[in-house]
Amino acid sequence: MNHRRRKKTKPESDLIERCQQRLSAINWSSLLARVQHEWRAMPTKHRLWLTILTPVVILIALVPVPKSDNEPQPPQQTQVDVNSIGLSRQISDDGRSPQAPKVWHQYIVKQGDTLAAVFRENDLSLADLHELVKVEGAGKPLSRIKKGQLIRYKLTDKQQLDILQLEKSDKSVMFFRMADGSFGRSE
């Protein structure tokens, strides 16, 4: 068996070599003569401005630009104290345990019921009903209750309506008492 070794050949696309060949092929003296001829053909003021502006442009290109204050800053982290003790183990300032959580009351609408009748039957304030109607919004969920619909509500410590939830088959509308005593709506 005759084993011949192949000769390693350099790749033809050697970029550095090609650049060196092209640079050596340039006739520098004729290029310099042509540039000098063009320089002398320019008006004196143009040559003056080019002499001044060329170093300035090169200097501007090389000087680093400071970061502006408009760049987005990473979000700052804030430490928050979280009370990890459960409500059942917390004790209020006056030494008593916290009050029991508010309980949801439920009512299923019967044939012919109106929301006013539901409020009367459950000892809820009709003044609260009028406030709710002010924020009723799209779909009129308070005006269009139907048989079998579930109405859930919570009362405040003073037995006032705090939250009212109307549930339909596919969605729920919730009305809640805000700090100023008026009601807000959430879907």
Image: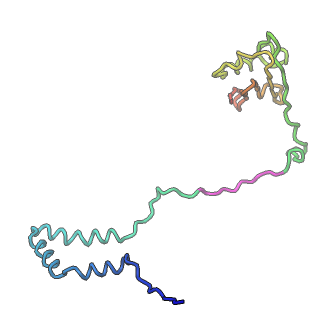
Would residue 16 be counted in the magenta stretch? no
User: In terms of secondary structure, what is the magenta stretch mainly?
Assistant: loop
Left or right, 6 with reference to 156: left
Decide which of 91, 28 is in the foreground and name it: 28
Q: Is residue 101 above or below residue 155?
A: below
Decide which of 148, 59 is in the foreground and name it: 148
Residue at image location 68% in from the left, 28% down from the top = 185
Residue at image location 74% in from the left, 20% down from the top = 128
Would residue 77 be counted in the magenta stretch? yes
- Image quarter in which the C terminus is found: top right
Could you say where residue 156 lies in the image, as x and y percent from the top left?
81, 29
Residue at image location 75% in from the left, 54% down from the top = 81
Q: Is residue 104 above or below residue 38?
A: above
Could you say where residue 68 lies in the image, as x and y percent from the top left?
44, 60
Q: Which residues are magenta?
A: 75-84
Q: Is residue 152 above or below residue 20?
A: above
Q: Quadrant of residue 102?
A: top right
Could you say where residue 157 lies in the image, as x and y percent from the top left?
84, 30
Residue at image location 71% in from the left, 32% down from the top = 179
- Image quarter in which the N terminus is found: bottom right
Q: Is residue 62 above or below residue 84?
A: below
Could you say where residue 101 lies in the image, as x and y percent from the top left?
86, 36
